[in-house]
């Protein structure tokens, strides 16, 4: 959500097509809202409740796409006399979208219960240690004098 907030606002203030395209590529590459939502739903639901939760999730994401597109169309105008907004018609819808993402982030931080058990957290630390070992192995490979000659 943090990259969503930054990229949405960055998209609104971009004045050049290339910059806007790069920002959208970054936003798309770092967006995992649906995957994380499904993971959380699988942790907090069981059986038929899970099926219903997944059905609602798909419906809510589809509805949010439709509503956000309409909201952007209605609010895409320049605001005379307000710096930045008087020159860019797309900044207001992007600001509203970024603020909605910020509200969601605050809600998640303070209201979403932790779904990892203490055993799962211990496993995540072993995953980080494996990544550390992998990076040490890459360092050895790249510093090897025989491989540099290839």
Image (cartoon, rainbow, N blue to C red):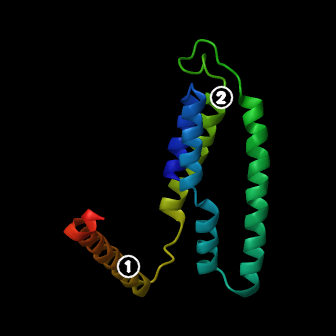
Give the percent coordinates (x, y) of residue 2.
49, 50
Q: Residue at x 75, y 50 (%)?
A: 65
Q: What quarter of the picture does the C terminus occupy? A: bottom left
Q: Which residue is mark 1?
A: 127
Instruction: State the SS at label 1.
Output: helix
**Nearer to us in this view, 59 or 130:** 130
The residue shown at (54%, 67%) is 112
Residue furthest front in the image: 150
Residue 14: % across, % down: 55, 29
Q: How many marks?
A: 2
* Marks 1 & 2, CB-CB < 8 Å contact: no
Query: Measuring 58% from the left and 35% from the top, which residue is drawn there?
Result: 20
On screen, residue 17 above or below 2: above
Tag shown at residue 91: none
Question: Would residue 99 be found to the left or right of residue 144 on screen?
Answer: right
**Which structural element holds mark 2?**
loop
Report the side of 150 relative to 89 (left or right). Answer: left
Residue beneath label 2, please? 90
Q: Residues within 10 Å of mark 1 (few under 14, many from 20)?
A: few
Question: How far across and how far down the image is residue 22, in percent?
Answer: 55, 40
Disc 1 to disc 2, C-alpha distance = 42 Å
Q: Is residue 94 above or below residue 140?
A: above
Q: Is residue 104 visible?
A: no
Circle 2 residues within 10 Å: few <14, some 14–19, many ≥20: many
**Could you tell me residue 147's position as x and y percent?**
27, 68
> Picture quarter containing residue 82?
top right
In this rendering, does residue 16 appear at all?
Answer: yes
Q: Mark 1 or mark 2: which comes first in sequence?
A: 2
Is residue 98 shown above or below 55?
above
């Amino acid at each position: 959500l943090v990259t969503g907030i930054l990229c949405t606002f960055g998209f609104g203030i971009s004045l050049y097509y290339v910059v806007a395209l790069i920002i959208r590529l970054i936003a798309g590459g770092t967006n995992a809202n649906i995957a994380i939502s499904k993971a959380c739903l699988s942790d907090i639901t069981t059986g038929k409740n899970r099926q219903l939760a997944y059905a609602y999730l798909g419906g809510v994401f589809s509805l949010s796409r439709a509503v956000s597109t309409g909201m952007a169309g209605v609010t895409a105008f320049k605001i005379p006399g307000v710096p930045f907004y008087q020159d860019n018609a797309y900044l207001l819808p992007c600001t509203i979208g970024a603020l909605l993402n910020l509200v969601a982030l605050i809600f998640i931080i303070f209201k979403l219960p932790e779904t990892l058990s203490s055993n799962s957290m211990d496993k995540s630390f072993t995953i980080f240690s494996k990544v550390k070992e992998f990076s040490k192995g890459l360092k050895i490979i790249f510093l090897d004098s025989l491989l540099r000659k290839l």
